[in-house]
Amino acid sequence: MRGQYKSMSLARRLVIDLMHASVPLVVVERTLKLDRLIQTRSSLAVRPGWTPIIVKAFCIVARSEPWLRTFYLQWPWPHFYEVPRSIAMAAIVRDSFDKDVPILLKIGAADEMPLREIEAILQSGKNAPLDDVPALRRVMRITRLPMPLRRLVWWFGLNNGRLRANNFGTFAITSLATTGSETVVLNSPGPSMMTYGLIKPDNTMKILLHWDHRIYDGVLAARALQKLEDVLNGEIADELLAGA
């Protein structure tokens, strides 16, 4: 049976590069009880999205958990590299690229920003002209390079602690909750990636934390999710209440 060649979009090429650089991640799941946060958020006329809420909360948790801010680097010898603060990344879709392909947008140190600023960064990443989003402009410029050069740039960026933190972040977040589905297996360069589900009628939300087992173990991952629940119902709910 004869088929046909199909062109590859720039966004799809970026996903292929990301998968080439990825390592298998282990996953832990927790159902968070978010009564106070949900009640506070429901009282607002303008409600922040769940992605900015969760990325800020996770960055706050990582302040006291340095392994959540640590990379495993292979060059020039296998070693760990800890950075002083978390850098969040979020999966977004831009209609100007390929509306079915998510790409990662750098948010930065979300715990140092108000939620409205994180929301603005996400909206700008989705809708602003590419030249107005430096992080995306840079990664797309690299993605246009021939494959051997791309592979070299990715290898160098992933094995230099400073470059890795600045360009790939310390953790990323993605979700298919609005489609009624969720991702249960992920590959990523690591060290951590998070997915979340829909809010249930009993004010619970399912969170899955995918992490690089070479860096830390399930006990820390479980503890991080417990702290995440506390921060969401505490500091984040307090910020929403103050805004209201």
Image: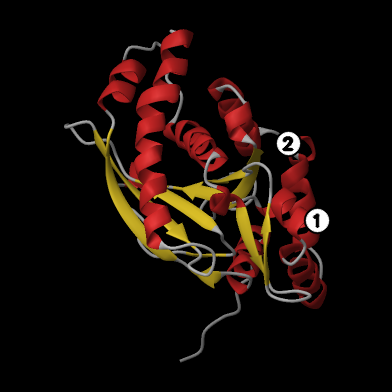
From the viewer's perspective, is 70 left or right of 47? right
Q: Residues within 10 Å of mark 1 (few under 14, many from 20)?
A: few
Question: The N terminus lies in which quarter of the figure?
Answer: bottom left
Kindly indicate whether the residue at mark 1 contacts the one at mark 2 (C-beta within 8 angstroms): no
- Residue under pointer 2: 129
How is the rendered protein coloured? secondary structure
Quarter of the image where one finds residue 101: bottom right
191 over 119 or under it: above or below: below
- Tell me how far mark 2 sits from mark 1, CA to CA: 15 Å
User: In percent of the image, x 60 and y 38: which residue is there?
Assistant: 126
**What is the secondary structure assignment of the residue under circle 1?**
helix
Q: Which of labels 2 and 1 is toward the front?
A: 1
- Position of the C terminus, as image quadrant, is top left
Mark 2, residues whose alpha carbon is within 10 Å: few (<14), some, or many (≥20)? Answer: few
92 or 21: nearer the viewer: 21
- Percent x, y for residue 62? 53, 42
Residue 8 drawn at (x, y percent): 64, 68
Q: Residue placed at 41% from the left, 31% from the top?
A: 231
Q: Which residue lies furthest to the bottom in this view?
A: 1
Which residue: 77% across, 55% down?
A: 163
Residue 149 located left or right of residue 176:
right
Image quadrant in which you'd find residue 146: bottom right
Nearer the observer, 49 or 180: 49
**Relative to 130, does residue 21 appear above or below in the rendering?**
below
Residue 164 seen anywhere in this rendered image of the structure: yes
Mark 2 or mark 1, earlier in chain: 2
Let me know if residue 181 appears in the view: no
- Residue placed farthest to the left in the image? 202
In x, y percent, where is residue 130?
A: 74, 41
Amino acid, disc 2: Pro
Which residue in the structure is indicated by mark 1? 141
